[in-house]
Amino acid sequence: MGRPDGPQLCGALLQNGNRPRRSTRSRMNRADLARIMRGAAPTRNFGRVSNVEPYKELLLPSLQETRTVVTLAPAKPVGLADLGMPLVDSTVVKKGRVHEYLQLLTDGKIGRRFQDIRVVALKTVEAEVPSAKVFVQFEVFGDNTAAPTNGVGFEAVLLAGEQQLATLSSSSLFLPYANFWYPNRFVFEVSIADFDQADRLDFIAKPEEVRAL
């Protein structure tokens, strides 16, 4: 067959006019897809600050384990009315005190303060039954750090020289808010033999994650 003349060629183009329209829609679909992908690209940018902030919030400051020694010495059974101790002829008292004690954060800053740590060890008789108890009392201050609701408390070790006699521990401190002094008092039952030998108590503030103000 020969080549179509001008009118035949125009007729053919008109009959097949849907082809260029399909091609145009394809180009438009590709353009729309490119715009959608460009619009979604910023959500995959992991360098944005907003993606880092939640991780920063998880980095809580931590208190270091800190120790202080409270030396116990025989004392008179006076000034103990608030303990309700029964006074009998066989009553024996040992006392020790540390005026100030700081617990530092891992970065070296002060995280918690303890003041006037007093240890009173008592041996007495109540209802004809001898017993020995150790009272540990202090005031504690959250120094721009808020304690968790389920804190770890402290640990104390009763010693005779280098010999460990008993371990005493508390699960938490009474420290509802930061930047305020709160009195704390704890009592532990010990054996008569441990009481008789004890000459010091190691007070140990445990490591703990806190929230900085």
Image (cartoon, rainbow, N blue to C red):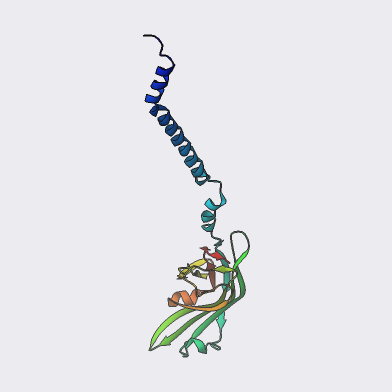
Q: Quadrant of residue 100?
A: bottom right
Q: Is residue 46 above or below residue 155?
A: above
Q: Position of residue 52 (x, y in %)?
A: 54, 52
Rendered view: 59 above or below 145: above
* Residue 117 visible (yes or no): no
Residue at image coords 53%, 87%: 80
**Could you say which is closer to the camera, residue 32 or residue 165?**
32
Q: Residue furthest front?
A: 7
Residue 7 shown left or right of residue 74 in the figure: left
Q: Seen in the image, is 211 located left or right of residue 14? A: right
* Residue at the image position 53 percent from the left and 66 percent from the top: 162
Which residue is painted at 61% across and 59% down in the image? 107
Q: Where does residue 53 sit, x and y in percent of width and height? A: 54, 55
Q: Is residue 47 left or right of residue 129?
A: right
Looking at the image, which residue sits at the far top? 1
Q: In the figure, residue 211 lies in which quadrant? A: bottom right
Question: How far across and down, in percent of the image, does residue 209 sit?
Answer: 52, 62
Q: Looking at this view, is 112 or 121 the one in front?
A: 112
Residue 44 visible here: yes
Residue 20 place in picture, x, y as percent = 43, 28
Q: Residue at x 46, y 74 (%)?
A: 194
Q: Which quadrant is home to the N terminus?
A: top left
Quick one: 152 or 155, which is closer to the camera? 152
In the image, residue 116 above or below residue 62: below
Residue 97 vs residue 205, the one in the foreground: 205
Mark count = 0
Specify the quadrant that holds the C terminus: bottom right
